[in-house]
Image (cartoon, rainbow, N blue to C red):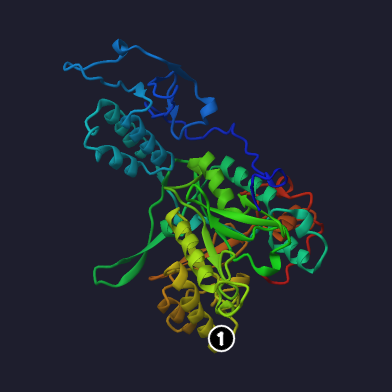
Amino acid sequence: MYEHNHPRYNHHHYNHQHRHPFRRAVTLIGCLILIGAGSTGLVFFSKKFLMPAEDPQNVSIVIEQPQSENLPSSEDGSSQLSPEVILTDSPLGQLLAQANLLAMQYDYDGAIALLKGDSQYADDQSVAAVISEYESIKSTLVEAKISEITHVFFHSLVMDTSKAFDGDHDSFGYNQVMTTVGEFEKILQSMYDKGFVLVRLHDMAYETADENGNMIMKPGSILLPEGKIPFVMSQDDVCYYPYMADDGFATRMIIGEDGKPTCEMRIDKDTTLVGSYDLVPLLEDFIQKHPDFSYKGARAVIAFTGYEGILGYRTAEKYADDPNYDYEQERQEAAKVAQCLRDNGWELASHSWGHLNMGTIEWERFAADTDNWEAQVETLIGPTDIILFPFGADINDWHPYTLENERFVYLHKAGFRYFCNVDSNQHWIQFGEDHIRQGRRNLDGYRMWKDITAESEGRERKLADLFRAEEVFDPARPTPVPEMDGGT
């Protein structure tokens, strides 16, 4: 059976008292509040909204039921809304609310274009006032340094620590490379409080043609309020492997009733829950509460292998003749969910087809793995230009890629332009003429434990810019966390 919001797995405990540090006031933001069925009310804002807006509970709103003679009117008798008053169920109110959401996510150009492009309200004084304010705010934004953008990553989140850390063979690896749901939520809150803003890899750099028609990689332009810190997030192995089925993790991703990706989690043979049981829906929940955590609607990079299938669907060719699966149905459902991810702002990536060390395996196996990715995974999810190397490995050392590196050439011909290894430093980015490389930071049990023990062992903390590990570390996690034996 399916259940929603099972109390045992209800982990949504966010602090809504946070104030956005960018305190510029906006004259008007539409707020849709219905007083009753069929009624029309006016919302008078007793103070200006902040951009991005504070939480609704922290904004003083007075709701009145005005008489028609209280409405300001033009010479022809039609109602005109001042910059302080909006009909709550009016098209104008809805238009301004849409523009506000864009502005909250730093897309001032998009918000202005939306308002100017509406033929009915483009000349409305309320719209003109908001456009003027957006333009004023935009002029204060600061361009981010692409070379200083950090990239953090996770694996599947542990939802039930009693199952994941039960002492069996798999729990050893879970303790090293996985993050618990409680830790993840605390990390998000800490990074939000510190001013971090999620951006896309494609915001950092983009492929374009030069004056000779050659395709090159150019740095992007990310404009944020002063003090805001852009970062990239990714998640590896979003495949929900069979061996994880009863260990306290989500079991597959589906499309929720709201059209957004969510997760199923099998509790036992008779009970499957639907809800926020992994990174994708949890991050979506957080951004819905804090839209200013996302730059222009950015979400994380989601990476797959292919040897078992993706997203919890058994899409690998070895399942084609397995009587336990409807192979074509598995592939169709996986493709729908992958498209849903793309439609909702998530970037999709390769983690290699077979979860292999792409820098050390023999050439024939390297080429075959890349070909399998194209044939078995890209046929489901569409073209991908991002590869997140398994094991944190790379196909070269820190020196730039060259055309003498046949592995780089092969991957480049396969369409890859963004190449990410693992590096515990705050940021490591290398631009090539037609590609970009970036180091990623693992926020898992191993790395947090290393931070907790750093001072006693005379080492430098690696996570202090993001959070204090002692405040995040899950008390249910066994200690000491074992040393890494290679495996991301």
Q: Residue at x 66, y 53 (%)?
A: 1
- On screen, residue 38 above or below 112: above
| Residue nearest the observer in this picture, 455 or 244 | 244
Dividing the picture into quadrants, the one containing residue 224 is top left
Which amino acid is tagged 1? Arg
- On screen, residue 109 above or below 461: above
* Residue wearing tag 1: 365
Determine whether, in the image, residue 209 is placed left or right of residue 168. left
Q: Is residue 227 visible?
A: no
Q: Quadrant of the C terminus?
A: bottom right
Q: Residue at x 46, y 51 (%)?
A: 298
Determine whether, in the image, residue 74 is placed left or right of residue 56. left
Badge 1 marks a residue whose secondary structure is: helix
Q: Position of residue 113 (x, y in %)?
A: 28, 42
Determine whether, in the image, residue 260 is placed left or right of residue 214. right
Q: Is residue 224 visible?
A: yes
Dividing the picture into quadrants, the one containing residue 355 is bottom right
Q: Position of residue 34 (x, y in %)?
A: 43, 25
Q: Position of residue 364 (x, y in %)?
A: 54, 89
Q: Residue at x 49, y 53 (%)?
A: 299
| Residue nearest the observer in this picture, 401 or 392 | 392
The crowd level at tag 1 (other Cα within 10 Å; few <14, some 14-19, many 20+) is few
